[in-house]
Image (spheres, grey):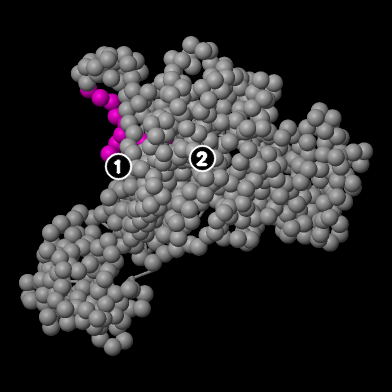
RNA sequence: GGGGCUGUAGCUCAGCUGGUUAGAGUGCCGGUCUGUCACACCGGAGGUCGCGGGUUCGAUCCCCGUCAGCCCCGCCA
């Protein structure tokens, strides 16, 4: 049917007879001559239908060439007349003089525009998702998927070349009561019993290590029934990998190699090894476990400088054992009262009681913080004219994340210039356990198979909350790219961790007996990582929503607008499963 | 589960302090036009102001509820 792509035609093709297939991007009907921008996935080319070369019936049919109709064009590539080249088009030196035009896919008026005029806004995302097949025709969106494809292929090649074996693991698996909510799939054969979709292939890959596969990877689909975010979907793809006889350094090295390769695939040059930062330091300096290190702004601790010269409420906070932390923002004094109020609101959404601000202006220090912080605290900050101080008092668990959020908002509002374009960092030495704020119970920070830091094993018995783990996260420009760890391979230690998490021996046996059993059969030391592939694709396309790199994504409310999932099912289908709906 | 923003023509938006016939651009339809590339020009059609209720002489506008989309908190082993 076709001889060439629309987007590949150049001056060198002049004189060539071509057959093209594509969609009518735009039509310009000048009466005696009609121009059609014809689009396929490789680009646009101008087709000219004119009396010098197009037969009368082709001339007569141009009215039916409506936007987004699928057509076949036969014609000859010609250089455009002098002065008529379009420098903005890759194919702008040529046009195709049509000798035959066939409408193979007529169209109604598209519900959303594809070939937009310059500067025209995108249709609302709701419409774009409803008419996804039209939105995906946009060259920008197609380009995202072309890159995504290359990233997938490159991942396979890099890992395969390093001896990793791609293994597929089940989609129908066992429910896991801990962690994220499972999607549950009823069993017809065993009424009343259920499979779950995997939150990750975690246990399977550990079993593969015990099986001696040594190096595994998978481009794994994972499912978590949790509320959505711009950077979180119900179903997503991980680059999942695991290796045997390794420590953290080995995993860092292979992860860095993959990431450097993927960035290179997208045209960016980045260097390994990545710097490292302890979780504690990341929290203290940046208020988050995924610091954006393109920017230097760091949180300072003023607690020791809060004294007699400080405001009553800050002294009271310190007396309660809280800490006072502050950000100094060079040039931040330009922020308006409205900006500062908005920043305080941001802090409050993170459960902080508020923000205290002070500006260093020509006349000296202004703002509530000028008095409240006190001369000693302010002097310790070495403020320069134009600086802004934002301080927050509270427990570390509250004030630090609040200032972390404020830091990002300040960067956004001031449109600060990044110090570097690519800021990778490994966050490591995470605590092994976390305290559930609602129940007060000990819970795991990563997952219950994460190995304790070798120096902290004794703490499991005495002070488990202080124990660090061999868990690590690669972070890029403030985005968590993934998460990994060295796993527990000593069955006794695994049982002890289960016990610390409040699982009885019976429960542990019931849920994870197969793992404990496998660990007793010669388990090699092993560890791995899972990288969020969709997020990587999003970052490398320059996007800020996963929906632009997933072909058929769900909305924030977990609906598929295109096909209309989820929906009810027929009663007879439920009867087979012996299920009853009560809503 | 909680908070915020949004919903007016196919699409993007405007619509004053509640007022009589709800507008613009684009797209669409018809017409003129042989070098356009946001073609130009002339004419036309197109509206459940998301949905339901309330207040009012009168609601796109105010109030309550609800649905949908987006963002955030919680949640995300």
Chain assignment, label 2: A
Q: Position of residue B66 (x, y in %)?
A: 42, 29
* Span highlighted in magenta in the image: A557-571
Name the mark on residue A246: 2
**Residue A541 visible from this viewpoint:** yes
Does A559 lie within the magenta span?
Answer: yes
Chain assignment, label 1: A
> Is A454 displayed left or right of B61 in the figure?
right
Outermost residue toward the front? A522
Does A487 lie within the magenta span?
Answer: no
**Residue A366 visible from this viewpoint:** no
Q: Position of residue A492 (x, y in %)?
A: 54, 20
Depth check, front residue: B11 or A458: A458
Depth check, front residue: A384 or A421: A421
> Is A79 displayed left or right of A182 in the figure?
left
Q: Which residue is mark 1?
A: A562
> Could you say which quadrant of the image residue A182 lies in?
top left
Q: In terms of secondary structure, where does tag 2 sit?
A: loop
Residue ID at (36%, 78%): A87
A94 up-or-down from A367: above or below: below
A32 up-or-down from A182: above or below: below
Q: Position of residue A33 (x, y in %)?
A: 19, 78
Outermost residue toward the right? A308
Disc 1 packing (10 Å; few <14; some 14–19; many ≥20)? some
Residue ID at (58%, 52%): A274
Residue ID at (34%, 42%): A166
Name the mark on residue A147: none
Q: In terms of secondary structure, where does tag 1 sit?
A: loop
> Could you say which quadrant of the image residue A108 lies in?
bottom left
């Amino acid at each position: 049917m076709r001889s060439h792509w629309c987007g590949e035609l150049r001056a060198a093709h002049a004189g060539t007879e071509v057959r093209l297939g594509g969609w009518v991007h735009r039509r310009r009907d000048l009466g005696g001559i009609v121009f059609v921008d014809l689009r396929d996935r490789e680009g646009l080319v101008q087709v000219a239908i004119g009396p010098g070369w197009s037969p009368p019936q082709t001339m007569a049919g141009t009215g039916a060439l409506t936007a987004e109709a699928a057509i076949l064009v036969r014609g000859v590539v010609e250089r455009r007349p002098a002065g008529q080249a379009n420098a903005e088009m890759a194919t702008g030196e040529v046009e195709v003089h049509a000798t035959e035009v066939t409408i193979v896919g007529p169209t109604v008026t598209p519900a959303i525009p594809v070939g937009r005029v310059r500067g025209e806004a995108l249709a609302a995302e709701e419409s774009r998702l409803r008419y996804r097949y039209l939105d995906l025709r946009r060259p920008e969106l197609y380009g995202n998927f072309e890159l995504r494809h290359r990233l997938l292929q490159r991942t396979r090649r890099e890992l395969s070349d390093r001896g990793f074996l791609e293994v597929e693991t089940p989609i129908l698996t066992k429910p896991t009561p801990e962690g994220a909510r499972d999607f549950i799939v009823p069993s017809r054969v065993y009424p009343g019993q259920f499979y779950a979709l995997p939150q990750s292939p975690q246990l399977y890959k550990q079993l593969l290590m015990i099986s001696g596969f040594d190096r595994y990877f998978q481009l794994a689909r994972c499912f978590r029934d949790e509320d959505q975010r711009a950077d979180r979907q119900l179903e997503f793809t991980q680059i999942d990998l695991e290796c045997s006889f390794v420590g953290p350094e080995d995993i860092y090295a292979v992860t860095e190699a993959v990431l450097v390769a993927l960035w290179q695939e997208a045209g960016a040059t980045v260097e390994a090894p990545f710097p490292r930062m302890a979780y504690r330091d990341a929290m203290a300096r940046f208020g988050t476990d995924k610091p954006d290190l393109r920017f230097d702004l760091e949180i300072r601790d003023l607690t020791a400088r809060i004294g007699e010269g400080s405001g009553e409420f800050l002294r009271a906070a310190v007396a309660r054992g809280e800490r006072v932390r502050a950000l100094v923002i060079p040039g931040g004094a330009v922020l308006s009262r409205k900006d500062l109020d908005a920043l305080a609101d941001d802090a409050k959404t993170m459960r902080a009681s508020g923000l205290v601000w002070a500006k260093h202006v020509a006349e000296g220090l202004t703002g509530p913080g000028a008095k409240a912080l006190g001369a000693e605290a302010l002097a310790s900050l070495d403020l320069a004219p134009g600086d802004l101080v934002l301080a927050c008092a509270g427990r570390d668990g509250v004030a630090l994340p609040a200032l972390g959020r404020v830091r990002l908002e300040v960067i956004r509002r001031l449109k600060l210039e990044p110090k570097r374009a690519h800021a990778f960092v490994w966050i490591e030495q995470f605590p092994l356990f976390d305290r559930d704020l609602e129940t007060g119970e000990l819970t795991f920070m990563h997952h219950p198979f994460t190995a304790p830091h070798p120096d902290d094993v004794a703490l499991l018995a005495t002070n488990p909350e202080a124990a660090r783990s061999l868990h690590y996260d690669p972070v890029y420009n403030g985005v968590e790219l993934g998460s990994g760890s060295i796993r527990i391979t000593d069955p006794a230690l695994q049982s002890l961790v289960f016990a610390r998490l409040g699982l009885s021996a019976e429960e542990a046996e019931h849920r994870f007996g197969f793992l404990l059993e496998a660990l007793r059969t010669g388990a090699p030391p092993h560890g791995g990582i899972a990288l969020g592939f969709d997020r990587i694709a999003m970052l490398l396309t320059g996007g800020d929503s996963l929906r632009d790199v997933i072909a058929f994504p769900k909305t924030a409310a977990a609906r598929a607008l295109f096909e209309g999932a989820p929906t009810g099912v027929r009663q007879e289908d439920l009867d087979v499963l012996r299920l009853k709906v009560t809503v």
